[in-house]
Amino acid sequence: MDRYWFFTWRTYGTWLPGRDGFVGYYHDNQGKRVIDNSQGESHTEAIPPLERYSHEVMAGEPVLLSGEQAVILLRQFQETAVYRGWSLDAVAVLSNHVHLVFGVTGDPEPSELLKSCKSYASRALNRAGSQRIAPRWFADGGSKRPLRGEANRVRAIQYVRDQAGPLVVWLSPEATILVGSHPATHVAGSPEASS
């Protein structure tokens, strides 16, 4: 693989601008575009008026994923990686967000990679007949961090593996060796891991 990526994105309506700890862009009172919680910056305080406004303009209820939906997403990410020729290292699906660590050949545009991941994921959930209470499954955008060097790749895999309260965590055999981990797959509520 020529380049590795660490992607994260939220489900629709679950982390609104203005909420304590929000990560993303918004416009301040002077109309200036601001990003909160950039890597290496201190934690951002809540902005209640911005959060209220964000909630008022939502087109539906927030989306929280179920364990069954998390398994559907994991299978879709694995299928997408095979189809696209990516090397999928790690996946964590939580009720309100998704983490992926994967490698690609060449240097494709990260926004297109993210769009592809989210599109295939949405279609898989729709095909499965999953019910949603919002106009879409996922929020706009997401984090697209390039992983330069093996040490950064390993740290990203460890971060995904060590998520608190995941619905599903999966590591490839190569990633499992890289981080010295145990089970390759963990499904919440499952007494044993499988691959």
Image: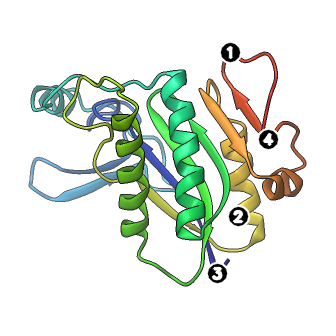
Alpha carbon separation for disc pair 3 and 1 = 36 Å
Q: Which residue is mark 3?
A: 2
Q: Quadrant of residue 5?
A: bottom right
Residue at 33%, 41% (x, y): give it. Answer: 138
Q: Quadrant of the N terminus?
A: bottom right
Left-right relation of 42 to 129: right
Residue 40: tell me if it is visible: no
> What is the crowding at mark 1: few (fewer than 14 residues within 10 Å), some, or many (at least 20)?
few
Q: How far from the left and from the top, in percent, is residue 13?
A: 28, 31
Label 3, label 2: how far apart the Cα atoms are: 14 Å
- Mark 1 vs mark 2: give the one in front: 1
Name the residue tied to disc 4. Answer: 184
Residue type, label 3: Asp
Label 4 sits on what residue type?
Ala
Which badge, 1 or 2, comes first in the chain's sequence?
Answer: 2
Assess disc 4: are there few (<14), some (14-19) or many (≥20) residues with their C-alpha within 10 Å of its C-alpha. some
The residue indicated by pointer 1 is: 189
How far is disc 3 from disc 4 in space, using C-alphas? 24 Å
